[in-house]
Image: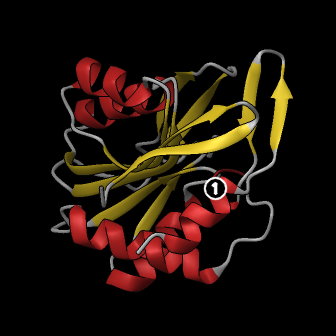
Amino acid sequence: MLKEVKKSLESSPIVKKGDYNYFVNPISDGVPAMKPKMLRELSSIVKKHADLDIDKIVAVEAMGIHLATALSLETDIPFVVIRKREYGLEGEQQVYQKTGYGSSNLYINDLHACEKILLIDDVVSTGGTLIALIDTLKDMKLDIKSVVAVIEKGKGKEIVEKETGVDILSIIKLDVIDGKVVIEKTIED
C-alpha cells in the first residue's frame, strides 16, 4: 500500500549538513514534487490506524500542512495549523520548541479545551517539537486521540513516548546509511 511513498523515500537525495545526513523528500521538504498518489497512500494508512473520532486535525507548519490537507479532504474533518508566526489572537498559546537543528516558537490558535484532536507531523527525529507541542496541548486540556509522525528517524519516537506518555503512530521508520535512505520498518510490517 505504501508503494509510491517507499519508492520516493528510497530515491531521496542525501545532503550533508555538518555531521547530519539529511534526506530530501516531498513528505519532509516539499521537493521533489509530491505525487498525489503518495498523499492518498498516507491518508489511507492514517484512516486505517489512527483514532478519527476527533473534532480537528492539527498540523505543524510547514510540512504537516499538506498531510493534514489530504487527511481533511479524505475525512471531512477540519484542520488547524500550528504556526511559526504570532498573530496575537485571543487565546493564542506560544510553544518553545528545540530540535536537533535549532529552536523557535510556535503559536497555537483555534483549539479549545475538551476538543478531540489528531496531531500530525512529517518527521520525528529528536522529538523536541512533539514533546513541546504535546505538553502544551495537554496543558490546554485538549483530548489528544492520536499523534502521527509519518517518518520516524532515530530515537525521537521513543523519547517522545517516554517523556509524554503518548503513543506515536509512525508510518515509516528509516535511517540514512552509506548515503542512502534505508527503510527499516513500515506500519504494514
Q: Quadrant of residue 141?
A: top left
Residue at horizontal 81 percent and vertical 48 percent from the top = 13
| Place of residue 166 in the rendered image (x, y in percent of width and height, measured from the top left) | 21, 34
Amino acid type at mark 1:
Leu
- Work out whether 115 lies above or below 160: below
Q: Is residue 42 left or right of residue 18?
A: left
Image quadrant containing the C terminus: bottom left
Image position of 66 (left or right of 42): right
Q: Residue at x 28, y 18 (%)?
A: 163
Can you identify the residue that label 1 sits on? 9
Total marks shown come to 1
Q: Is residue 154 above or below residue 10?
A: above
Looking at the image, which residue is at 42% across and 53% down? Answer: 120
- Identify the image's colour scheme: rainbow, by chain, secondary structure or one colour: secondary structure
Element under label 1?
helix
Give percent across and percent down for residue 171.
Answer: 39, 54
As displayed, is residue 176 above or below residue 62? above
Q: Quadrant of the N terminus?
A: bottom left
User: Looking at the picture, how far across and down is residue 9, in whole percent?
Assistant: 63, 56
Residue appearing at x 34%, y 69% in the figure: 45
Which of the two residues, 112 or 145, is positioned nearer the viewer here? 145
Q: Position of residue 154 (x, y in %)?
A: 49, 26
Can residue 84 be spotted in the picture?
Answer: no
Residue, far front: 178
